[in-house]
Amino acid sequence: MRIWAVANQKGGVGKTTSVVTLGGLLAESGKRVLVVDLDPHGSLTSWFGYDPDRLAHSAFDLFQHQGKVPEGLPAQLLQPTSCERLSILPASAALATLERKMAGVEGMGLIISRSLAQLWDDFDYVLLDNTPSLGVLMVNALAASQRLIVPVQTEFLAMKGLERMINTLQMIMRSRNNPLPYTIVPTLFDRRTQASMHSLNALRKAYPDELWRFAVPVDTKFRDASEQGQVPSALYADTHGVRAYRRLLDDLLSQEKERA
């Protein structure tokens, strides 16, 4: 099992779109894929037609056992999606209460790691969608993951959020036994605007080694796919955005082979 977290300490940069599109492409290539929604807003959950405000069971259940994960519980929480070989562990709005309810409970930063350990033989890839705020949920994701993908919108304010994310990553890495490789992915890129061009050039100067060499363009087909509850590649295999994510996936998989 390979575990990738998709995170940035700013909303609206394309985290959920990245998880759904990369997950769909992996599933279409024959991989068994799990996407995990760790955002109380539940955008990933809503994408596949589940209501985070009405779910009786969700990722929140994993955090209700004093830092332990009962055997079999993670598998019970999984739900199917419209994409074959792609399952989801959904979120509920109750995740927003974790910081208040679980303060001081030991082992809360390793709940997702322990949960995925029970599913190790069931999936080839796991993609974790994250809340934009630093807290127990993001700490869980970064502790569990083997690679971090950081989408960043090509605009000034998103770059400030990226700085916070990199600072958080450096803090987390000091507590890990092994390094966490990360790739910064420019998103919502519009080459027709000076703002996008300036931001992309600034990213290239600030993060020459970590920045993906291409960018994901603005593409309204992502919104259309979410409205239909489908992974984008199932409906729009040749759209500009899907082609960009396919190229990104190829590069990520090549990097995985090199590291192996």
Image (cartoon, helix red, strand yellow):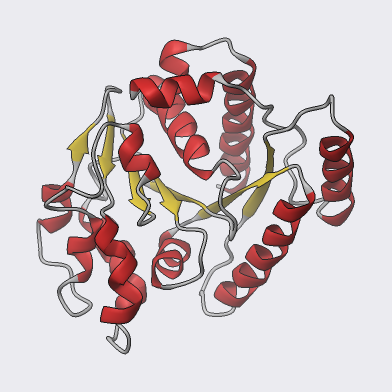
Q: Residue furthest front?
A: 53
Left or right of 90? Residue 131 is right
Q: Is residue 31 visible?
A: yes
Q: Residue at x 59, y 28 (%)?
A: 245
The percent position of residue 100, horizontal first and vertical second, equals: 32, 80
Q: Does residue 145 appear to the left or right of 258 in the view shown? A: left
Image: 176 above or below 91:
below
**Percent position of residue 98, x then y:** 30, 72
Q: Nearest the camera: 130 or 180?
A: 130
Expressed as whole percent of the image width and height from the top left, the position of residue 84 reads 27, 22
Q: Is residue 105 above or below residue 92?
A: below
Residue 34 can be seen in this image: no
Q: Residue at x 62, y 22 (%)?
A: 219
Residue 109 in the figure: left or right of residue 196: left
Residue at (85% x, 39% y) in the render: 195
Q: Position of residue 92 (x, y in %)?
A: 25, 54
Residue at the extreme bottom of the image, as rendered? 104
Q: Relative to 134, say whether 203 is above or below.
A: above
Q: In the rendered image, which quarter is residue 248 located in?
A: top right
Q: How many marks?
A: 0
Residue 115 figure quarter: bottom left
156 relative position to 92: left or right: right
Residue at 20% from the left image edge and 56% from the top image edge: 118
Write down the quadrant of residue 69 in the picture: bottom left
